[in-house]
Each structure stands twice: as C-alpha cells, then as structure tokens.
Amino acid sequence: MKHDILIAGVGGQGILTIATILGRAAVREGLHLKQCEVHGMAQRGGAVYSHMRLSSGAIWSDMIPCGGADMLIAMEPMEALRYAAWLAPEGWLIANEEPVVNIPDYPEPERVHAEIRARPRHVLFNATELATKAGASRAANVALLGAASYFMQMPAAAFEQAIADQFASKGDKVVGANLAVFKAARELAESRAAK
Amino acid sequence: MQHTRLFLGDEAIAQAALDAGIRGAYAYPGTPSTEILEYIQRAPEAAARNVHRAWSANEKTAMEEALGVSWAGKRAMACMKHVGLNVAADPFVNAAITGANGGLLVVAADDPSMHSSQNEQDSRFYAKFAMVPLLEPSSQQEAYDMVWAGLELSEKLRVPVVLRVTTRLAHSRADVRVRAPRPENPLSLPPDSRQYTLLPANARRNYAALLRKQRDMIEAAEASEFNAALDGADTSLGIIAAGIAINYLRENYPGGACPYPVVKVCQYPVPEAPIARLIERCRRILVLEEGAPYIEEMVRGHFRKSPEVRGRLDGALPRAGELTPDDVATALGLKEPPALKLAEVVKARPPQLCRGCPHADTYRFLNEALRAYPGSRPLSDIGCYTLGALPPYDAIHSCVDMGASITMAKGAADAGVRPAVAVIGDSTFTHSGITGLLDAAHENTPMTVLVLDNDTVGMTGGQESLSSGRLEGIVAGLGVDPAHMRVLTPLPKNHDENVKALAEELAYEGLSVVICRRACIQIRKRQ
Ligand SMILES: Cc1ncc(C[n+]2csc(CCOP(=O)(O)OP(=O)(O)O)c2C)c(N)n1
Ligand code: SF4
C-alpha cells in the first residue's frame, strides 16, 4: 500500500495542518511516512507545498517524482494548477474553489476553475463555504482532507481519531466541529465520485 | 532501549544532541537550520538539565561560545545556515588548529536552489578547507545517529566535526529510532594550556598534528557505517551517491535495488579506497551529489585513469539547484526530463509583507520623503523587510549579506552619494550592523540609517531579538549624536509627521539613526 500526496496552497492557509493530521492517521495505521514541507521566505503569502509519502514498505526520496502523485490536495485553485504536473494521469485532484487574490494579475477565477474541470479526475468545491456551514469557518483544510480521505485506502476512523488528537487541546467543541466538517466533505466526495 | 519518533531532520539533530549529552547549543536563526535550536528550547529535558539554548547575536559568537564549552571539556553544538558559516569562518577554521577538547559539532544547513537564501554555497568545501571530517546524512535516522557519531569522532580525533544537511532533509519528517541518553562529560580543561594559544610556535605544532590526523580521518571515513560499497552486476556504469542523492537513486528502482555498483558517501573526507575500486571496475562513472560538483571535480581531476565521468559538470545533471528524483532518473536514461510548463492562467505568487506589517508603513513614508531626491536608492539588508524591494514598494535596492546595508551606504556616502540611506532590521543590526555603524559614527559619515525595529526576528518565524530594549543604548554608546537619533512609530496615522521627521534627517550632512518601531503583527497575534 502506498499513497503519494502533494498538498499545495498559499503561505498561512494551514496546509501543514493537513499534513500533520494525515501523518497522525498514517502512524496510527502503522505506515511509514516521509513528509517534506516549506519553511522560510515563501511562508509569507507565497506559494507553498508539502510532499506526503505514506507506505507499508520502505520510502526512499522525501520528494515525490514528477507525475507520480496519487493525489493533489489544493487549498487554492491556482495553486492546484501550479503543481498539476506532479499528479499521475490516474491521480485525483481535490481543490478548493475559493481563490486567494493577493497578487495584482490574478486571473478570472472561472478560467482557473475551468482548467481544473478539464482534468479527468477532480473534486472541486468551495471548502471554505462547506466548513462554515458545518460550523467551523476556519476548517477549509479539514474539509479538503475529508474529501481526499474518501479516495485513500485508510479507514475513516483513523482520520477521525487523528483529527480528535490534533484539536484535543482546543476543547470538545472544536473537535466536534472539525469532525462534522470532515464527514460532510467526505460525503461530498463520495457523491461526486459516483457521477 | 530504543523507541521511534516522528522528526524533521532538524529535530532529529536536536534530539540527538540532547541525548548525546551536550552542555550547550549555540545558534543564530537561519533557514533551514532554525528548527534545531527551537526544538531544544521547547524540550523538557533541556530545561531540566539547563542546557544552554538561548540565541546568540550571530554565528561567529555562537561558534566561539561552543568552542568555549568544548575547551571546558563538555560537548557543544553550533548550528547555522550555510552563509552563517561565512560569518563564523574565522573561529571555525582556527578551531581546527586549536582542536577540540569536549566534542564539538558544527551543523551547517545548506540551501541548494536558494529557497530562502542569497546563494547555494556548499559547506563541504569549508570542512575540506579547515581539514576536518564532515558527515552528511541521507535520512533523518542518519541525522540522529551522526550527531552521536560526530561528537564521538570529535573527541577521538580531537577536532571539530561538521554535520552538513540540506533544506530537503532539514524540513522533511520521518520516523527515527532514538537511543537512551548519555550523561554529560565532567568539566576538564585541556591538559596543555598552550593548545588554544595560537602563537606562531604553538600554531605550527598544532597544524602539524592536524596534518598527521588527515590519514586517520580518511581511515575513519573508509570504516564508517555511513559509507558503503553496494555491489551491482552491471559494471557498464558505476555510481557515487552522496548524502540524500542515494535516495533519489533508489527511488528509481523497485525495492531500491540499483543494478550498478554504487559507492554511498555520507562521511568525509571522501573514502578513497572504495572509489578507486569503483573506477577500476566501471567504464563510466556517474556522480550524484546535492550541491556543488564537489566529489565530481575530485574524480575528474584526481583519478586520471577514470574513463568517463558524468554529473553536474557535463550537463548529465543540472549545474545548479537542488537535486530531484527526476533529475537522477533523467541522468540514468530512465525518463525524459519532465515538462513543467505551467497553464497560462497560473501566475507567479512571490512572498510579500503581511497585511498590517509595520515595514509597509515605513516604506510608504520613506518613499515619500525621498521624492525630493529623484533617483535615490536606499541600500538594504536581509529580513522580511527585503520584500520592500518588490512592488508595490520598490523602496530598497540591495540585499547582500547581514549588515551590508550600513557599510555599503557608508561607502556610497564616501563616494559622494547624497542622500546615502541604509535600511536594516533590528536583529540584522545586532547581528552585524553595530560594527559598521561604529565606523560611520567615528567619521560622522553623512548618511541616514533606518533601523526597522519590529521587536523580533520576523523572517525566520519570530524568534527573540537581542536588540529588544537595548537599541537606543547601543546607538548612543557608539557615539551617534543624540540630536540625530529619532524614534518613529510607523502607522498610517503618523504618516505626515514621519515624512517630515525623516526629511529633516535626510537633509542633515552627518550621521542620523532613525528607529522605526512597531511590533511585527505575527508576534502580536501570538501574544
Ligand atoms: C549570515 C546569515 N545568518 C542568518 C541569515 C538568515 N536571516 C535572514 S534575515 C534574518 C533576520 C532578520 O531579522 P530582522 O533584521 O529583525 O528583520 P525582520 O525579518 O524581523 O523584518 C535572518 C535570521 C542570513 N541570511 N545570513
Ligand atoms: S512576519 Fe512580521 S515583520 Fe514579517 S512581514 Fe509579517 S508582519 Fe511584517
């Protein structure tokens, strides 16, 4: 069993939280992992990414080879396209619709969405909105993780336990809201994948 | 007893140093090395033993403080980014001549591809220059084990040992088996007090001893558990893979089984015997290494018999930048280079100042005050405030090395530039700006120095700034005329009065220091 997952977004969007929860779930399942991330300059509102490799066997490179990712999780639609070359032809692209417009030449969001929809396997949804409706407006990252989890060979319970551990220090209410976001997004992915 | 934990490469180094019984860790922040000392600052065992873990003013002071711990017979670690080793080069190279007493480990974190740096210099050259051993982990586990091995080697050969990591390993997480901790060494000063007194007569004797140890260092590398000669049936190609490059090689073969003979190099000086054997056996040699073509140049130059050498120098691999598994696959002829053409809708997203950052307000009033001097170009330095070189500010026009804003502006003033303006952050100022300002105060150089005091080391994630509460005292102590030292608060509502105050200092034909003080909003949020 192996999952090579690239997570992308804009500095400050919380992509490292996605990586950390995935890592907790994987360790719980007894998998090996290597996960590299971006620290430093780019974290100031620039393009950031994390490579997450999970496997029951040995993992060599910390970086996923180009064209080798089973999944690309993007907190931001233009960032999804920046790393599209990493995705394997049969890989899934899970992306947030909501753009982060912090540059003067940001394209029309519709054009960005159209590029994503042109990919054979994608789940494009407004993770920010879904998270807000489910009661945790800052949990867009957990929403994306929820959608992504549907395509992974790991039980939902492993993710749920990892989410509970991740937010335990913030109290039961925060844990409950994040679990609700996770579940709603996972169901959304299930219904989209069935189409 | 061993158990497994999930660690960044940097965290593995930090935990190992604590487990191996260091008395002190010394560092100045710098990507990708910052997380080492940050981990030690958070670690309960460091607090329990009161391991030294405060930030130093710069890498030179850090290196010398670590040398002092080693002199006293205890184990010490100094950590820095690659360019930090330039700052610490004087004590580093001379510590090779004094030698070590307690184990002395120097961690240099290189940044190929310049993710957060001004250059991609390769610290292996520094170890060779100083003639000391260097360890280069290929995994987080090796990073952990090498801290132990490095400190032992340092005590055995009585020399400082370098641990070189690169960004990818420093900032990548994996599971690491940790060992039971070892107690600290007792205090014991060097038996011969002349050892650290590098008068020429003593230095010559020490240098002769260092030269004699070179053979021991090569033998240690040849016997090292971190180096290996891995056999392969297909001798049409022999591969030398250093540090994490071995992973990119194995990535390309099922089960990591490369069909060609491979020499894995993770401990230096380069192990001569296995490389000589590889060259004897194989018609062609491919050298895979992260950073400069360091081994490649040796193999090309040293071993004249060698048939054909491939690597970064002949274009088999890119000459610059971080190595990738794709680069290695291409060099092995397994894959076409990936087509990384971006869709037309994808625009560059450079880093930028946070919304509400005090530096943004400073650049607005600086730009307005300078409108009276068309074509003027403030010289600057390294930190979050360097982002003021980009639009919409376009306010600063240099970034060379820590502290160079003040000294370059002084040179510009000496050359006749008016107004000469330097823009420097508070931590950069205490790192390397103070001595330059002393030069300017001594000559009352006509220039204006803006110290951007956000009360933290912003760029590297908000570490404590040693300037905190001391800035005016330092500036006054250097002899800057108090009438020309001002403190402004960069806020939109103060814009007009800040423009006016700065304009007065720009017009003054002498040295002015303008402290622009408002806390970084990121640390404000955390408090
Ligand atoms: C010799 C050296 N050491 C460390 C660094 C990494 N580094 C760059 S800027 C900086 C600190 C900047 O702090 P400050 O001057 O307070 O500016 P701020 O980022 O807070 O605006 C550091 C640690 C470096 N580039 N060179
Ligand atoms: S981290 Fe602080 S100093 Fe750096 S850009 Fe953000 S607000 Fe400004």
Image (cartoon, coloured by chain):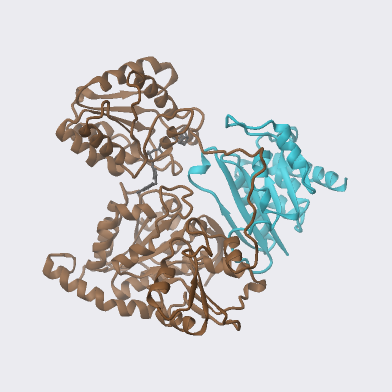
> Looking at the image, can residue B282 be seen?
yes
Q: Is residue B7 left or right of residue A54?
A: left
Q: Colour of chain A?
A: cyan
Q: Colour of chain B?
A: brown
The percent coordinates of residue B159 (x first, y second) are: 29, 70
Q: Is residue A129 above or below residue B492?
A: below
The residue depicted at 57 percent of the width and 32 percent of the height is A103
The residue depicted at 67 percent of the width and 44 percent of the height is A80
The residue depicted at 39 percent of the width and 17 percent of the height is B494
The residue depicted at 51 percent of the width and 48 percent of the height is A39
Q: Is residue B383 above or below residue B114?
A: above
The percent coordinates of residue A45 (x first, y second) are: 54, 37
Which of B20 and B79 lies nearest the eye of the viewer?
A: B79
Circle count? 0
Occupied quadrant, residue B424: top left
Which of B290 and B340 lies nearest the eye of the viewer?
A: B340
The percent coordinates of residue B177 (x first, y second) are: 53, 68
Occupied quadrant, residue B68: bottom left
The percent coordinates of residue B128 (x first, y second) are: 33, 67
Which of B516 and B332 lies nearest the eye of the viewer?
A: B332
Occupied quadrant, residue B21: bottom left
> Looking at the image, can residue A76 be seen?
no
